[in-house]
Image (cartoon, coloured by chain):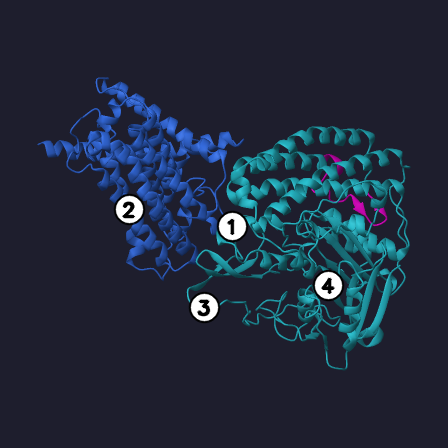
Chain colours: A cyan, B blue
Amino acid sequence: MDKTFVVKGSNLRAAANACASRSRQGLLAMFACDERAMSGCYAVYCLFDGRQPGGLVTVKGLVPADGPLEFPSLTPIIPAAAWYEREICDMFGLTPVGHPELRPLVLHENWPAGLYPLRKDFDPGRVVPDAGKPFPMLHAHGEGVFEVPVGPIHAGIIEPGHFRFSQAGESILRLDAKLFFTHRGIEKAVEGLTPDAAFPMVERICGVCGVSHALSFSQALEGLTGTVVPERAKWIRVLAAELERLYNHVGDIGNLSAGMGFQVAVSNGSRLKEGLLRLNEALTGNRYLRGMVVPGGVAMDVTAELRGEIAAALERFEPDFASLVGLMRDNDAFLDRVDTTGIVPFAAARDLGVVGVAARASGVDWDMRRDKPYGGYDELEFAVPVHRSGDVAARLWVRVDEVPQTVRLIRQALERIAAAGPELAAKVPPAPAWSTGAGWSESARGANLHWLMMGEDNKIWRYFARSASYPNWPALSVAAPGNIIPDFPLINKSFELCYACLDR
Amino acid sequence: MELLVQLVTGIGQAAMIASLAPLVAGLIKTAKARLQNRRGPGILQPYYDLAKFLGKDSVVSPTTSWLFAAAPPIYFAAALGAAALAPVLAPLASGLGMGLADLFMLLYLFALGRFFLALASLDAGSSFGGMGGSREMFIAVLAEPAILLALLAVALPAKSTGLTAMAASAAGAKWALSEVFAAGAFFIVLLAETGRIPVDNPDTHLELTMVHEGMILEYSGRPLGLIHWAVAIKQLVMITLFAVFFLPGAPLSWPPLAQAVLLAVKVAATALALAAAETATNKMRLFRVPAFMTVSGVLALLALVAR
């Protein structure tokens, strides 16, 4: 089902273009790998979705290490490649020739030139001196145009990100974001570890989509070792993944109102979310469901007593949630704020490869659970709500409409768990050397895609994680211009973008 | 001799309002918290906050000029001046502050404080200050005529713009349709002038949405304490104006103690109404504020017509 085309680096653009035109969703991810030890080349991988369900199409471009370290940029024909190529340039020193906006992305002004952290000959323990280079930001010019710098330290307790608004009065002309302030180098840190040793780090890429990351990594590993997950574990994984979606959506729906000072909805949202977090704690001992999913299956059983508790909690949850939504849906003052604010047009969402709620709010009908089914989702019944207006309201209503579907999935998972045998996890055999595989799952924010290349002795050679927030951050710079700056916090909240997911 | 009496009562009244203003601010905060399913801080919290601020040193940006240092005392003095003129004790001691206590005097005192604070917000050169200052002036331009119009609905039957005469006339007025319109008009500007939802959000941490809070973002320590105190005083003066002019009063024949209790009840009720209004809705888009102020203006005109 998976197809791989190996091409010369100089032919990468043509090959990628051919694959992109034969795929529904276009470029899913792009990354490089230092394969000098095997082939004397750097490899640039581009992942596309194939036409048939299940498999991915991979284009692998080889850039010889002894030639010019460059490849033709895909960005002019596939805009979604823009960030990936900047990251490849930062981390591997491979230049995407013809990139319209080639400037640093991950590495900031403190990082010395000529040091490429993901090359195999870079020692991760090395301390580098502060280079003090300039960091180029985008500007707008003209009479009366001024800049508003915000962050990286904010007044609220949130993660660091620097935003540069070019303003004409209250209107936003251009928004540039400088992110990756707390990059942890997880991809580098897990190289040379066994999957079991790497797993805790992978699960901690993000606090609020830990299940999804754990799931994506496990599925990649299970795929390349041929491990079959036991029936019971399969449905417990669905249960955990949907519980994660539920608390995220409910929290995000309530929290959106904080952007407009609508405190009643904020309070109600946090109260509902707290109830769900306590349910998570009863289930796994961790409020964010950490430790449930492990490679090969799950670590904990969901007993009949716990299943009853979950079912009862859902019964209580549904009317409560309906009244929270009522506070918003029947409230003209609220609707006035969210309607037509921060629009991402369909074309932009498609071109940038936007995923998850943000994509489905702009009319991109794409959900990995349905379109690239994994982990038993093809056996379950659920709908994928899509809205077309692309504004803050659409992103809100997609979340609101997904909540009943998630509840439906949880109920189906509970039934299936009850009917399944007792086995919780299969043993994962050592992975064959130089095998590669991808795993994915649809988190509350969109698809988290992980890719693994195993080296000798069951050690990870290269690991790449593309979080849902990665393709969605650039969409924020599309949504903001044309709005007024006091509406920006609201627009930002409607995407619910994650900083930690970038700083993997 | 009469001048001396007026001076002493004015100072006494200013001191009284200044000392009670944090209590009213605390009452609004606590009521809001309860309405929003939160426990909230104690009702005396604003006093503790003020004590903390006034006991702290201040960090001043090296790019600022004398304006930055001068603005908080001027803002505070203007608020105290307004407090001295407000017709709080008017029904009790008629003839008080006749010469000075004029509605234009009161409005200009507010405008003076605002003018200096807006200048100071630009002084440090931070973009948040500039945004806050420009928004504050934008809202003020709309709110000032609306306040004036609403107050004219009281001044007209009193045939005077003197605050004491207006208070006496309002206390004797029968509660009719025009009073309801005028009260609605003034309540809207009350929300705007005290920096509350739906015009501004006093509790937000989102710098990009701030109006008043954005203006004073560069201040810390003692000057910040002065500004917070002045804001509370201005708020209490505005609430008092609403209570005296726009809520049903008692005839002047009532004993002073009963008058004072009635006023306190009306002020507390207004504070609770502010908390309820803030809880019931969300902040509106900045450029919808003009329409909101227009509603106030139209209500005031209706009040004048209905009379």
Q: Which residue is most to the left?
A: B1
> Mark 1 sits on what residue?
A487
Q: Is residue A48 magenta?
A: no
Quickly name the residue at label 2.
Answer: B111
Question: Going 20% across and 30% down the picture, which residue do you hit?
Answer: B165
Whether the residues at callouts 4 and 3 have beta carbons within 8 Å, the answer is no
Q: Residue at x 70, y 48 (%)?
A: A209
Task: Between label 2 and label 4, give the one nearer the viewer.
Answer: 2
Tag in front: 4 or 3: 3
Measuring 19% from the left and 33% from the top, which residue is drawn there? Answer: B160
Residue that label 4 marks: A188
What amino acid is found at the position of numbered circle 3 in the picture?
Gly
* Nearest to N terminus: mark 4 or mark 1: 4
Q: Closest to the observer: A469 or A331?
A: A331
* Secondary element at tag 3: loop
Give SS at disc 1.
helix
Q: Return the chain for callout 1.
A: A
Q: Is residue A288 magenta?
A: yes
